[in-house]
Amino acid sequence: MAARQRETDLYEPVKRLLESQGYEVKAEVGAADVVGLRGEELPVIVELKTGFSLALFHQAIERLKVTDAVYVAVPEWKGRAGWKAFVANRTLCRRLGLGLITVQAESGAAQVHLDPGPYAPRQSKARRERLLREFQHRVGDPNTGGSVQTTLMTSYRQDALRCLKTLNENGPTKAADVAQAAGVSRARTIMADDHYGWFERVERGIYAITPKGEHAIGEYAHVLEELE
């Protein structure tokens, strides 16, 4: 297993990278880990860390008081989880106006993934409309903000429970009749897709409750009362 990179291991690769672009580079100048100067341009500052952390971002933001050209440098990610974390932190760097450099352990190559610059996010109209639809269609406020590792009550689940309640009261029923009785226009799709294992098609266009659905009737009894 390769030894974990130290902050000092990052210095020479970062220095070579900056020098290849015409900068004169020195380490530990004032509070900055790395400083590069090129002609009359603003100085480039690079903060070195063995991984992303709040402390790293705090330090880098502090350096923005000196120059707009501030980078953070960390070891290259490893594995799928490392890649996902890298992508999330790259987005954070972009939002903070910071540049981002990674250093490959085996080769010692430093790579720039992001240059410093103002953040101008493009908003997604589709995502906003999806958010508003979910908000408007959901009944009440059944979840607790900040919940993790728990089943969330979405508007889709609420609609599925309405369908379940209708079948529980009426027995096997045509999808169109379920949609009308439950007030769920997408009842046929919900029962056919059966994401929760609650429904089964017993005849063409006719659905009934599975044993798992019967269990859900008891499990979500309090929710079903609120949906009435």
Image (cartoon, grey):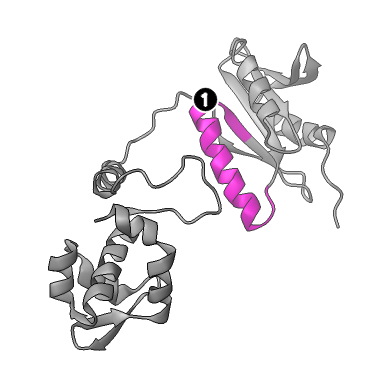
Q: Residue furthest bottom?
A: 203
Across and down, in percent, residue 95 comes to 49, 29
- Front-lying residue, 151 or 220: 220
Q: Residues within 10 Å of mark 1 (few under 14, many from 20)?
A: many
Pointer 1 residue: 97
Please identify the quarter of the rendering in which residue 16 is found: top right
Q: Is residue 184 above or below residue 61?
A: below
Horizontal side, residue 99 vs residue 186: left or right: right
- Front-lying residue, 105 or 136: 136
Horizontal side, residue 106 vs residue 163: left or right: right
Magenta part of the protein: which range? 77-100
Q: Is residue 109 above or below residue 56?
A: below
- Front-lying residue, 149 or 63: 149
Which corner quadrant holds the C terminus?
bottom left
Q: Residue at x 76, y 14 (%)?
A: 31
Q: Amino acid at mark 1?
A: Gly
Please identify the quarter of the rendering in which residue 182 is found: bottom left
Across and down, in percent, residue 166 comes to 23, 70
Q: Residue at x 38, y 32 (%)?
A: 121
Across and down, in percent, residue 76 comes to 69, 46
Say whether residue 93 is magenta: yes
Please identify the quarter of the rendering in which residue 119 is found: top left
Q: Residue at x 26, y 88 (%)?
A: 202
